[in-house]
């Protein structure tokens, strides 16, 4: 199930900003997620930033982040090469954790197991809990509106 934030009388025309965003507000998504209504749920937001602390790094590395909840990985059966998704406690609390894409882990750590290491993303320190196996679903069904190139663009660098 996806939620359409428009009223039934509204229609959306491509490129028409008059109807606002097709995304839910953070408070609405958080309330719906915590309501117990959906059997499985995840919340998604696409962000951009820079990773600025890796071994031998000489300059910030721009990255696309798919901010989400731990349920995302189970809901979409996302394959892991190292580690795994974070637990529900990390969703509820201020535990800064991250899962790297296979591609980003190869860039940053030469493809080695980086679980347990930390990265500085946009000024905040995150602990790596997992690294994906190669995973590039097209179209990018889990978030058709976001990212570089829309539903057929590349997947996120980290989650």
Image (spheres, rainbow, N blue to C red):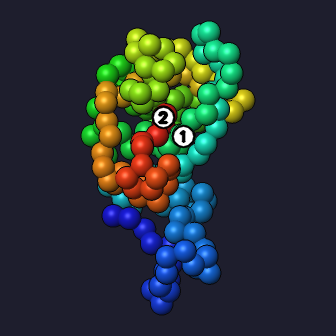
- Is 159 positioned to the left or the right of 118 in the image? left
Mark carried by residue 90: none
Element under disc 2: loop
Marks 2 and 1, the one that precedes in the sequence: 1
* Viewer can see residue 4: yes
- Residue at the spot x=61%, y=76% of the render? 17
Q: Is residue 21 above or below residue 86?
A: below
- Is 20 positioned to the left or the right of 132 in the image? right
In front of the other: 33 or 119: 119
Q: Is residue 92 above or below residue 114?
A: below
- Residue 3 x, y percent position in the rendering: 42, 68
Mark 1: give few (<14), some (14-19) or many (20+) Cα within 10 Å.
Answer: some
* Viewer can see residue 89: no
- Residue at the spot x=42%, y=42% of the render? 155
- Residue at the spot x=54%, y=64% of the render? 24
In front of the other: 111 or 44: 111
Q: Is residue 1 above or below residue 73?
A: below
- Residue 36 x, y percent position in the rendering: 41, 57
- Residue 127 x, y percent position in the rendering: 55, 22
Q: Is residue 134 above or below residue 107?
A: below
Give the spatial CA distance, label 2 vs label 1.
Answer: 5 Å
Residue position marked by numbered label 1 in the rendering: 64
| Disc 2 to disc 1: CB gap under 8 Å | yes
């Amino acid at each position: 199930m996806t939620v359409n934030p428009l009223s039934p009388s509204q229609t959306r025309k491509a490129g028409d900003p008059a109807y606002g965003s097709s995304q839910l507000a953070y408070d609405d998504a958080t309330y719906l997620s915590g309501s117990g209504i959906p059997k499985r749920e995840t919340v998604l937001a696409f962000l951009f930033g820079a990773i600025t602390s890796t071994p031998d790094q000489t300059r910030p590395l721009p990255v696309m982040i798919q901010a989400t909840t731990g349920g995302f990985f189970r809901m979409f059966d996302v394959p892991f090469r190292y580690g795994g998704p974070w637990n529900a406690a990390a969703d509820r609390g201020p535990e800064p954790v991250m899962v790297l894409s296979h591609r980003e882990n190869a860039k940053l750590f030469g493809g080695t197991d980086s679980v347990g290491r930390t990265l500085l993303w946009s000024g905040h320190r995150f602990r790596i809990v997992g690294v994906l196996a190669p995973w590039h679903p097209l179209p990018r069904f889990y978030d058709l509106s976001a990212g570089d190139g829309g539903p057929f663009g590349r997947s996120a660098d980290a989650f």
